[in-house]
Image (cartoon, rainbow, N blue to C red):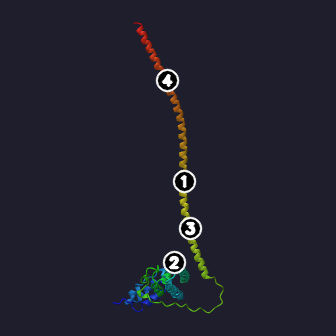
């Protein structure tokens, strides 16, 4: 049994992956319903919704085909040119590659915004990583060119990229999605000057990011302030305990001085008493001797 997709599956996939991201699942399910009873129904149902970064790259492939082809072509030339290059040349080459992918990623963000989706920094990083992978790895370039990505790509330049898992269908590798040609411009008419919507969108995006940054900074400040107050309270408590100990020490030192005075008086009293005992014992001994002498004389 052949694993080849039935005729028409790639074309259906090309249409579905070119839709707005929010429309993918309902339109896919509608196609499945229309194909009920045919071999295509199950295959279409198995098509996965693309990750946001993959959808942005798919959009870029359809609407900015020349830029994507430039990335892929430059990547191929760079891979060939790397052989025999010294470290300085490789660093310059890497810098140029990053500049190109960054520029195309910026265009991808603008394109996504034109199609109703604001791209976050995290998603933009994944988009740039996918474009970089297309420059480094030939199979990744095929996956990007197909316009049927379901997940972002990443390449180290050492390990091979598993591009087959990143596309909707194995046959997508080698498939080239048709370029979407924008409709011709309408005839020029005199209209009042309108605000620069692109610049306004950029400003609003910058404001949203600034507000998000401010909110995060305020949250960190509040946490730091709470921690400071806790430490300050413990510091005051320790200082109070130290003052209590100092007062207790002063009281004990004063009591020790009084006890020393009492000890001196007690020692004096003890010495006087011992002297009195000694004198009394001597007087007794003298009296006893006199009694004994007189008793002997009377005999």
Question: Position of 8 compared to 187: left or right?
Answer: left
- What residue did someone put label 4 on? 275
- What residue did someone put label 2 on? 125
Secondary element at tag 2: helix
- Disc number for residue 235: 1
Secondary element at tag 4: helix
Q: Is residue 20 visible?
A: no
Residue at 48%, 20% (x, y): give it. 279
N-term-proximal mark, 2 vs 3: 2
Q: Nearer the viewer, residue 269 or 19?
A: 269
Image quadrant holding the C terminus, namely top left
| Quarter where residue 229 is shown | bottom right
- Disc number for residue 217: 3
N-term-proximal mark, 4 vs 3: 3
Q: Is residue 153 above or below residue 282?
A: below
Q: Position of residue 25 (x, y in %)?
A: 45, 83
The reply to whether discs 4 and 3 touch (Cβ–Cβ < 8 Å) is no
């Amino acid at each position: 049994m052949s694993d080849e997709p039935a005729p028409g599956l790639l074309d259906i996939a090309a249409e579905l992956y070119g839709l707005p991201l929010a429309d993918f699942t309902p339109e896919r399910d509608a196609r499945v319903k229309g194909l009920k009873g045919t071999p295509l129904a199950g295959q279409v149902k198995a098509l996965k919704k693309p990750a946001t970064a993959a959808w942005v790259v798919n959009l870029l492939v359809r609407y900015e085909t020349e830029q994507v082809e430039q990335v892929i072509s430059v990547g191929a030339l760079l891979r060939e040119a790397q052989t025999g290059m010294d470290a300085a040349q490789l660093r310059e080459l890497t810098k140029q590659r990053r500049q190109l992918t960054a520029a195309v990623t910026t265009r991808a963000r603008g394109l996504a915004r034109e199609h109703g989706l604001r791209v976050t920094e995290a998603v933009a990083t994944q988009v740039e990583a996918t474009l970089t992978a297309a420059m480094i790895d030939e199979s990744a370039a095929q996956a990007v060119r197909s316009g049927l990505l379901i997940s972002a790509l990443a390449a180290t330049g050492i390990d091979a990229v598993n591009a087959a898992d990143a596309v909707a269908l194995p046959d997508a590798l080698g498939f080239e999605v048709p370029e979407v040609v924008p409709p011709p411009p309408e005839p020029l008419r005199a209209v009042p000057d309108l605000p620069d919507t692109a610049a306004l969108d950029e400003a609003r995006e910058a404001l949203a990011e600034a507000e998000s940054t401010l909110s995060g900074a305020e949250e960190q400040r509040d946490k730091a302030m709470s921690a400071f107050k806790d430490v300050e309270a413990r510091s005051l408590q320790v200082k109070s305990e130290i003052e209590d100990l100092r007062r207790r020490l002063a009281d004990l030192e004063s009591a020790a001085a009084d006890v020393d005075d009492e000890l001196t008086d007690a020692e004096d009293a003890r010495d006087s008493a011992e002297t009195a005992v000694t004198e009394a014992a001597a007087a007794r001994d003298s009296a006893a001797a006199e009694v004994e002498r007189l008793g002997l004389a009377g005999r």
